[in-house]
Amino acid sequence: MEVLVILVPLALALGLVGLLGFLWSLKSGQYDDLDGAAWRAIADDEPVTEHPSDGPA
């Protein structure tokens, strides 16, 4: 039971650190454009070019 004296404050401190990190990310605009990031992940950055050797045999 003595270990609870250490674990409970440690758990509360880690929860507070997580909450502060989340609030910081909200304030810095990390969640402003979720759709744009999703489309950038699947967008083609380079146009596809066909090579003459790729044609039918």
Image: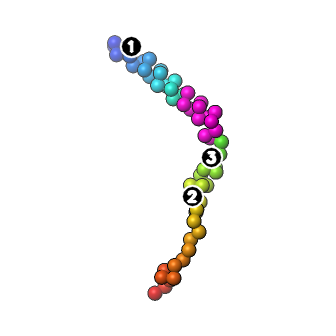
Q: Earlier in the sequence, mark 1 or mark 2?
A: 1
Tell me which residue sits at (34%, 13%) in the image. 1
Q: Main secondary structure of the magenta part?
A: helix
Write the start and end of the magenta stretch as one range: 20-31
Q: Which mark is residue 34?
A: 3
Mark 2 Cα-neighbour bin, 10 Å: few <14, some 14–19, many ≥20: few
Q: Is residue 16 above or below residue 22?
A: above
Q: CA distance from mark 3 to mark 2?
A: 13 Å
Q: Which mark is residue 40?
A: none
Mark 3 Cα-neighbour bin, 10 Å: few <14, some 14–19, many ≥20: few
Q: Which residue occupies the foreground of this view, 20 or 7? A: 20
Q: Earlier in the sequence, mark 3 or mark 2?
A: 3
Q: Earlier in the sequence, mark 1 or mark 3?
A: 1
Q: Is residue 57 above or below residue 24?
A: below
Magenta-span inclusion, residue 1: no
Tell me which residue sits at (60%, 55%) in the image. 40
Which kind of residue does numbered mark 2 sit on? Answer: Ile
The residue labelled by disc 1 is 5
Secondary structure at badge 3 equals helix
Image label count: 3
The residue labelled by disc 2 is 42
Q: CA distance from mark 1 to mark 2?
A: 49 Å
Which kind of residue does numbered mark 1 sit on? Answer: Val
Q: Is residue 46 left or right of residue 56?
A: right
Q: Are marks 1 and 2 in contact (CB under 8 Å)?
A: no
Which kind of residue does numbered mark 3 sit on? Answer: Leu
Mark 1 Cα-neighbour bin, 10 Å: few <14, some 14–19, many ≥20: few
Magenta-span inclusion, residue 24: yes
Secondary structure at badge 2 equals helix
- Measured as percent of width and height from the top left, residue 22 is found at 56, 32
